[in-house]
Amino acid sequence: MTMIERATIDNTIIRASAGSGKTTALSSRFLQLLLRGVHCQTILATTFTRKAAGEILDRIMTGLAASALDDGEAKKLSQTLQLAGFDQQAARPMLRHMLSNLHRLQIGTLDGFFAKLARSYSLEMGLNPDWEIVEQRTIDQLAQASVGSVLSHSDAIQLLHLMAKGESIRGANKLMMEAVRDLYEILLDSTPGAWFQLQSHAVLSEATLSSALEQLTAIGVEDKRMAAARAKDCERAANENWDGFIDNGLVAKILDQTNAYYKLPIPDELRNAYLPLIDHVRGLVVNELKDSTESTYHLLDRFRERFEASKTESGSLGFNDVTRRLVKLLEASGDRAEANWAHRLDWSLDHLLLDEFQDTSPEQWRVIEPFARRVMKPDSQRSFFCVGDMKQAIYGWRGGVAEVFGLVEHQFPDLRNRELTCSFRSSQVIINTVNQVFENADRFESNNPLTNAVVRQWKDRFKTHTTAKTNLPGYAILERVGEADDLFAVAVDRIKSIYERSPNMTIAVLTRANTEVNKLIFALHSAGVPASEEGGNPLTDSAAVLLILSLMQLADHPHDSVAWFHVANSPLAAMVALPPCELEREKSPEILRHVHSIAADVRRELSERGYGATVARWATVLASSCTVRELRRLQKLIELADEYDCDATLRPADFVEFVQAQKVEDPTGSPVRVMTIHKAKGLEFDVVVLPCLSKRFIPQPGEVMYFRPSPTEPISLVTRYVNSAHRRLLPPTILQAYEQQFERGLSEAICVLYVAMTRAIHALHMFVDAKESDTNQSMSGVLLATLSNSNSAPVKSEGIVYEHGDPDWAKKLPVNAASHFAAVPPKRTKSRGDVADKTLTLAESTTGPSRGLAMKSPSQMIAKIRGTIGAALSQTAEPEALDRGTLLHACFAQIQWLDEPSWQNGLLEKLRRQFPDFAKLESTMDEFKSLVGKPTISALLHRASYSDQIARRVCPNQIIFEPLSATVENERSFAVRMDRWIVQGTIDRLVLIHEGPSLIAAEVIEYKTDRFWDTDNSMIEQRVADYRPQIDAYRRAVAQFTGLAIDRVLARLVLVGIDREFEVR
Amino acid sequence: MAKNIALDDRRIWLDWSKPALPAAVDWLFERYRRESVWNLSGVIVVTPGARSRQRLLELLVERAELKSLNFTPPDFVPLSQLPERLYVPQHKFASDVIQQVAWAKALRDVGADRLKVLSKNVPSSDGLFEWLPLSRIMRPLHVDLASEALTFGDVANEFKRMRADQSELNRWNLLAQLQRTYYDELSAVGLWDRQAARVTAIKKTECRADADIVLIGLVDLSRVFRQMLNQVAARVHSLIFATETLREGFDELGCLRSEFWLAQPIELSDDQLRIVDRPADQASAVIECLLELDGQFPVSQIAIGIPDRSVVAHLRRALDLADVDSRDSAGKLLTQALPVKLLQAVMEYLQHQQFSQYSRLIRHPDCFDWVSDRIGNRMWLHCIDQFQNEFIPGEFPLRDGFHLSKVSELHDVHRAIIDLLKPLVGHTRRLGQWVEPWTNLLLEVYGGREIDDESSPDIEALFACRALQTALRLLADVPPDWTLEGSAGDALDFALNQVEREALAEPDATDAIELLGWLDLPLDDAAVTIVTGMNEEFVPSSESTHLFLPNSARAQLGILDNARRYARDAYALSLMARSPRHLAIICGRRNDSGDPQLPSRLLFATDDQTMAERSASFFQHQADATSRVWLATRTVHPATQQFSIPRPAIDALKMTSLSVTDFKQYLQCPYRFYLSRVLKLEQCVDNLAELPPFAFGHLLHEIVEAFGNDPIKDSTDPDEIRKFFRRQLELMMERHGEQPSAAVRIQYQQVRLRLDKLADLQAQRRRDGWEIIEAEVKKGTGTLVVDGVPFSLRGRIDRVDRNEHTGQLAVFDYKTMEPATPTDKAHRKNGEWVDLQLPLYRHLIQTRDYFVSGPILLGYILLPGNIKNTEFAIAEWSEEELRSADQVAFDVIRAVRRNEFWPPADEPPDYSEPWSAICQDDLPERWSTSEVAT
Ligand code: SF4
């Protein structure tokens, strides 16, 4: 190793703004390490999606490849990435190193890495080694089952009732499933104590309450309005309308500390009289909340027991489960762990490269931390590197806690800290707009101080962006759509014109929710703009698919007249001969019976041919009436069906559910793409259109409020959600929880806005809705406040609020901007001819040497498998009988001629060899000896007697010039070709008869050793007849390999049991 | 040294520029043919797999025919059985099943607490069956090592030598002891472990061969095989397909030397290589390759290699659509066969006897047919749905006596099922004792089936049944005193575990393209070979995680490791590249779920330049976004949606009456009204976890109806009323049988809470002088005269009250929706009538005898979730408001008279999901109704 290589690499944390080249930074770090001779296996590089991981690898490999091919490229690379001493010569070995270690690379997702860890520790984690990561669908099924058992607890009803704050909801199961969906993750991430933070609060008794009221009414009040208000308050209190009580009149004023009514101060005496009542209400609220929260905990906790157990038993885990179990494992094993890990994982993990760090969840960090500590030990040859952007932390709902980012800095003070704010993506115009919005964020004045605080915080954290792409033309516009117009319509209109003006620009329409994606797609389609949908929808957005699903549904429920009607009015009806679904159906059982049998047939086809094959068949029926989009969807359905076949159930309805649950993208290659902002993260587009800004971004009230003392600590306080009115009555700790949650939600919402805007390379089109009532609740508010040119209050009028850059930017495009990693013109691989229109023809199978002939034993090839399955099964005799048969045959095989007694020599030993574990060896031997003593058989097996017979049989009326000689081949195996089969078999005893030197005949002798033989003649005839075809096959075979004429091949069937033989001719 | 030379002679170099197997045939011909006799009877021939064995025989026969020889085929021995041909086992071998159980026994005997070193959760019980899961980990590890002539003890020592982490040592020491116990268990019952027996034979140099042994292209033999063969080296001939210049790459027996092949370049030209995006695209690439053959080759001369199974489905679809038959040599997994699925379904149902499992079982085609034959009726499935919807059973126990009587067919069905499954119920017994009941069940369902050996389903069923029969039989061999006990399910589960990986071969075919596994390719002599899935993890495969033996340890121990895996595949690919054939290699960029895949390392075993170019073209390969559409082949496609929304068939249909609730439906959407109210289409479900809202409401209605028709309706005592309600509720509850699902039970309690509250209000209301004069007016009918023609109105009124003092009438409808919707909000959306129920009651009530003209109070009795809001809510509509409602009703009636049910409303109304498929609600390309509307 040279000097440079030994020098340690400093541990770095990078805050990289959008487009500032996170991936580049990470890839170059990777290359640096390689250049220093680090083995690629010891570098763990993780990010959050497999796709992103793939991009990192692509980046590294293309970079290396390009450099390996061309020194110029290498030099370029070494500059942009500050890779001292990197050139073509260096690149080649590095590339080879990577390529020959592809199977060792540790570039992937954090989840993937954890899964790998967990694999090798399955046993220690108490998992059955064949556990697997399963789809949400499977987990939901387990959840449903567990919920069932939770509900069957005797006191479930009370708990549910409390949980629902006294409501007697219609659907217990529904309620519980929702609780699980919304709260289970929180339960797992909180200390048990967290749910019991509320102290119950005293309430007034009937008596004291009414006396308190009397006191209140007793007090003299001069001011008319105040008196009236007080009267109303008392009335509300009297008929226990407590919500009204605290929301109105003097109470409201007292609670919000105003303590004045219409500017008139509320006398202390009066105020004090109110206090006990207010406190009473507080009691009611707190206690209800306490009950609701605690019973929620109890229900969920019970659920947890069942649920986690069932996941472990069935070995079906989600990625979160893996992470959590790893955390447990770590806690258990402590420091010893990592040493051992190196052994189990088979590589020591020396360099950490973590991407998208802001999306790391506390649990995930808990697993990484020990590794991080280890690599950051001073003067270890190891290193730590992480990169992320808190401004793009939009995955809170997936457990990501951006603050982990900050925490790491503070946990490891000597981390080298870098900030990248220079974009390599966006034009100056875009960057300016982004700057203007976020630097002036504080111009946005919400009526909610919390909101303002968060926004200001954001502004303070925001560093002015610059761009390397100053030469790019750009355009940004904020439009306010008038009361009269429909915002989407206008947006679609603009998109249309942009698309028509610059058809080869990539245009992204970014929405907040998937539902909007569909709306827009529909709108764009109808406007004649071919938009590509990337939200990923269930295939149920295709008419053809729906038809097929209906047929499935009908197969599962023959009485489902909706499905029946749907299919009956489609091309599929003819395919399955489905009668029309008219009113008459109710009258005629025949029709119904018919439908039922159709359903049965479909079910059978599905389980015999498989879903893939069946759906494919149906699809071809529909294909001709399908638009190209329909075809694409149909094709995806076939692919799903094929996938489904692996674990297909017996119910078509299950398949329908499966399809409904799968989100399948439909990329069309169209330059106009519609997707959610979350989906757009990490992507970039020439033009970005944001039509969904007028949407309340202040987080919707959640199911609970919770508090996390520090990013990596578990949640320490949880209560069910309460509305603002009630919140005023709660202890500060709860408010704190509410606020923390609110802040997190809000700043995430702003992150979403930031991500959305920074996707744009050239142009950014933003729309806000004039119909929107209060803009201080939404992104549009922020934009209006910051972009409306004047510090005066945001314009209320419609039209263009903000415009920057050149609307005709597209005309001014330079050829194309170079990226960091130059690409090599791809090697000439075969051009992909359009298969669709060619038709495939292959040569006729020639008669000549053909492959894949069927192998058959004589019995198979002649006797078709006849009779019932039952019969066939009973034929597979008991092993016991089998052994005896084979043993007897083996004995016969030892005999050339009985005249030569030598056959007995060492017979038993020979057989022992063949049948080490056959118990009845001796006894069977004795049986055999008695058999060969019987007249027929012994005549057959003595040379003398046999020769006499054979002479007569072979040539009855011929003169024999030379004496006949007979040679024996026992267990003569053969293989010959008979038309389309290779026939293979063994002949028990083949006797070849020569006249002098020349072979003139042969005889096949077949022993049948069945013990209990029916002596009734007709039966025997029958059995013999059964065997005839097989024996014939033998004769044909012999004729073939001996070259004898078939009539020169004799055959005899010997029924050993009864010492009888039958000539087979 | 002499020995070595002797050994060296064992290697026969067959030039790999000729097809492998034919070359082997040449050799066998040269060596063993005597004039017209070609007698291979004595000769033991071993090939890498069944596939090459079959092909070799084919070629031998062909040659014999050609030269018209008296041919005796050799003695083909599967590699796995070769050892037993070389020595004489002294005892009976333990079957896989028995080995499995022996391991379980060993584990149990070593004891839970000692096993803690190994696994976090170990069975608490002594039941042997509990221990099987763990044993499933031990056995493969044992086989893996034993085939390399290593004991767990050896590994433990090696680890000690390597100074492995203490925790690892502890594990291996324990494992070592486990293994010893395992052997003891076996010998205790006079059985032998196959691997152990072989190792002993080697130690005692017992191996003998009285025949020639010809190894054909066996380049990767585990240690046990190598050592045995070395003992009979004199009779061994190892045919190696390579030029002798590569002798460094092979050991004396012709097995590969990893280090050599790791460094060996593989000569592939770039135009043999295709990089495509996803498995579907790999399929298309194959078709392209075939197209480029320009029909020179027959299907029988084309083989497609399938290292990555995820390509198969796509490929077969693609070939189907191109009308090319294909044969998957991997066959069909036994577990996919119907008989197996039947037994599994039975097992699952028996375990928990849940309704969901029952409803699966009865839909098994063969089970369905069997039942139908039994009850002589094929039209009964709907009864199951009906039953589910009505009673929402959690369990569906395997016994008579819970209330099926309502749906009599179901009753018969269940009786049949009970007869079928009874023998399998009951407590744990020796697994062996379950063999018969299971086999009988198979016979009962399949026994009678006539086999038509042209129909593959029949053959498949037969073979599957056979396989099951044998698998089950093995259970009977377990030594009785081992007392392996469990339920019928356990027995089956165990049996199936043994046949999990078995497959049912597809029928041989000379006129189909063969889909071959990677290992079958090198020796295959097809003229065209197309290899798909040339990606890392498939070719070469590599093990990245292992519970006990990470790769480095395996390397240390000199057993199968990633290097050897690479060598094997590197040689295989080299062989393919060298032998004269049309070779195409396809390499995928992403898998089915769109995740990136890595290219095979083999593709880069070449000079720097090519390496760099290839990696460039792989890693910057851009997929064209559009996924290929196979279905599009050879058809023109419409630009607009062709699947229509069926027009109403209205010939001669005349509606002469409507129910009061129909109007709302019609106003929302005439077409959906037509579907639901005219055609009365209904959707079936059977997955209700609890009472759906309407059923929940229905339940309440039934109770209050009973109340309204019972003398108690005049009670002013809330408690009395409450008691009545509860009694009713209990009666209702009984319908759900003994075990209604927990959710349902809870729902009933929810209903109770609402009724309790109602009781108070009702008592009060009675005190206020309101008496119920009618409840649930059954066939309330009224008449509206529209355009001079009477039109009749149907509808049931929940309840009519009269004030005993004023004679004032009040008409009520019970509402359970939450949150409670006040009357007017429910009936009018910004001024427009959207529902006419209450107003129309005015007309219904006129026909009642107690009716006296004069204003009538209309209202809801709200029973919402939040009991606080329970109330008698009276609507405050003025007379002309009500008349305007009538006008709306008239319009609807006129429209209905004109049969106007078209077009469907564009915005689907709430709760119209059932119709969404027919009405194409969520389609970006909706069928335009407008053009047809007029
Ligand atoms: S109780 Fe149930 S099973 Fe028994 S007869 Fe009545 S309905 Fe049939």
Image (cartoon, rainbow, N blue to C red):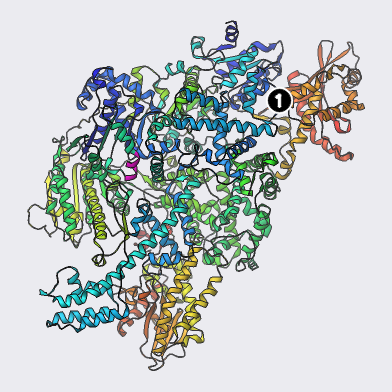
Residue A668 falls within the magenta-colored stretch: no
In the displayed structure, would residue A476 be above or below residue B150?
A: below
Q: Quarter of the image holding residue A371?
A: top left
Q: Residue at x 88, y 23 (%)?
A: A940
Q: Which residue is mark 1?
A: B90
Q: Main secondary structure of the magenta part?
A: helix
Where's residue B904, x and y in %?
38, 63
**Label 1 Cα crowd, 10 Å radius (few <14 / some 14-19 / many 20+):** some
Q: Chain of mark 1?
A: B
In the displayed structure, would residue B68 be above or below residue A576?
A: above
Closer to us: B753 or A518: B753
Dot 1: what SS? loop
Q: Quadrant of ligand 1?
A: bottom right
Quarter placement of the C terminus of chain B: bottom left
Quarter placement of the N terminus of chain B: top right
Residue A365 falls within the magenta-colored stretch: yes
Task: List the single residue furthest toward the top.
Answer: B2
Where's residue A248, x and y in %?
21, 74
Q: Is residue B6 left or right of residue A924?
A: left
Q: Amino acid at mark 1?
A: Gln
Magenta extent? A362-367
